[in-house]
């Protein structure tokens, strides 16, 4: 297995940020006994953190869920407050494009790249899933057509709407970075950005999430249904926000609320969904 970190600003001159976004790569080897030139599906992880930080609980432990199931895995640590939109979208686009450009060397199937995001990272994943075709992204990063298009999304208790009734206010405030433009706020309400360009999507949430209301996922799913985008959604009856793996791998010893055996099934459910989609 190979493990290394790349600095996105070294790879894309068009990324202008005072911070230093990185792509951490976890790549399993191929073997002649199985298939020396196997191309594997990939999972790009976007941790949550209200666009104010990137949670380590929703980074490497998530990537390691998928690695033993035949996926090449990557973690994007993106720019956060006080840097706002569209910098994070540009960085997610750059990460996807970089994976595609290195698909042969990294044994990746370039047509099987999924983006998984948690909370605000779910907003970022859904942003690149609905807005990847915006012309300014390709122009600024020097991308080929569809080079930054994800082939699937996994959205975990995601922030998706900017509707004041249901949004997570801190995430949207951080993303707007002091701007008050109503048009920008509307653009960040991603249930309104879903269309034919949106890839198949897996969503999970809990009914009593007290931080990011479940309506975020319900509104997005309604839009997916409207456009006949294939999706699978699991709404669990109970569970606090930020469950991550829902077990000891992402819970502190005294954080019993982050251990939830029912919600923990999301991991295998998402793996099965990806395998049905890509393999």
Image: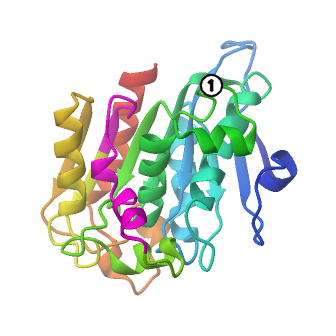
Q: Quadrant of residue 226?
A: top left
Magenta segment = 181-202
Point 24% across, 68% down: residue: 163
Label 1 environment density (alpha carbons within 10 Å; few <14, some 14–19, many ≥20): few
Query: Can residue 260 be seen at all in this image of the molecule?
Result: yes
Residue 94 percent location from the top left of the image: 68, 44
User: Which residue is the site of mark 1?
Assistant: 145
* Left or right: 100, with 181 as reference point: right
Element at label 1: loop
**Total label count?**
1
Q: Nearer the viewer, residue 204 or 193?
A: 193
Residue 267 percent location from the top left of the image: 37, 48
Q: Nearer the viewer, residue 99 or 36?
A: 99
In this rendering, the answer to whether 158 lies above or below 106 is: below
Q: Residue furthest right?
A: 10
Point 72% across, 26% down: residue: 103
The quadrant of the image that shows the N terminus is top right
């Amino acid at each position: 297995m190979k493990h290394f970190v790349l600095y996105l600003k070294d790879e894309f001159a068009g990324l202008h940020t005072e911070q230093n976004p990185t792509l951490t790569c976890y790549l399993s080897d191929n073997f002649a006994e199985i298939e020396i030139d196997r191309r594997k599906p990939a999972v790009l992880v976007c941790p949550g953190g209200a666009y104010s930080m990137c949670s380590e609980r929703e980074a490497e432990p998530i990537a390691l869920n998928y690695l033993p199931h035949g996926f090449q895995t990557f973690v994007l640590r993106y720019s956060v407050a006080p840097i706002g939109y569209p910098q994070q979208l540009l960085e997610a686009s750059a990460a996807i494009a970089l994976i595609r450009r290195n698909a042969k060397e990294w044994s990746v199937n370039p047509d099987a790249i999924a983006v998984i995001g948690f909370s605000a990272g779910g907003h970022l994943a859904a942003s690149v899933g609905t807005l990847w075709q915006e012309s300014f992204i390709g122009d600024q990063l020097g991308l080929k057509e569809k080079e930054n298009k994800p082939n699937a999304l996994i959205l975990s208790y995601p922030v998706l709407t900017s509707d004041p009734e249901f949004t997570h206010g801190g995430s949207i405030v951080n993303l707007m970075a002091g701007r008050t433009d109503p048009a920008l706020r509307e653009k960040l309400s991603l249930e309104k950005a879903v269309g034919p360009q949106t890839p198949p999507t897996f969503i999970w949430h809990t009914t009593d999430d007290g931080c990011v209301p479940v309506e975020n996922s319900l509104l997005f799913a309604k839009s997916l249904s409207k456009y006949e985008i294939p999706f699978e959604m699991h709404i669990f009856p109970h569970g606090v926000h930020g469950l991550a793996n829902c077990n000891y791998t992402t819970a502190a010893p005294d954080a019993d609320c982050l251990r939830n055996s029912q919600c923990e099934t999301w991991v295998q459910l998402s793996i099965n969904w990806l395998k049905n989609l890509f393999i």
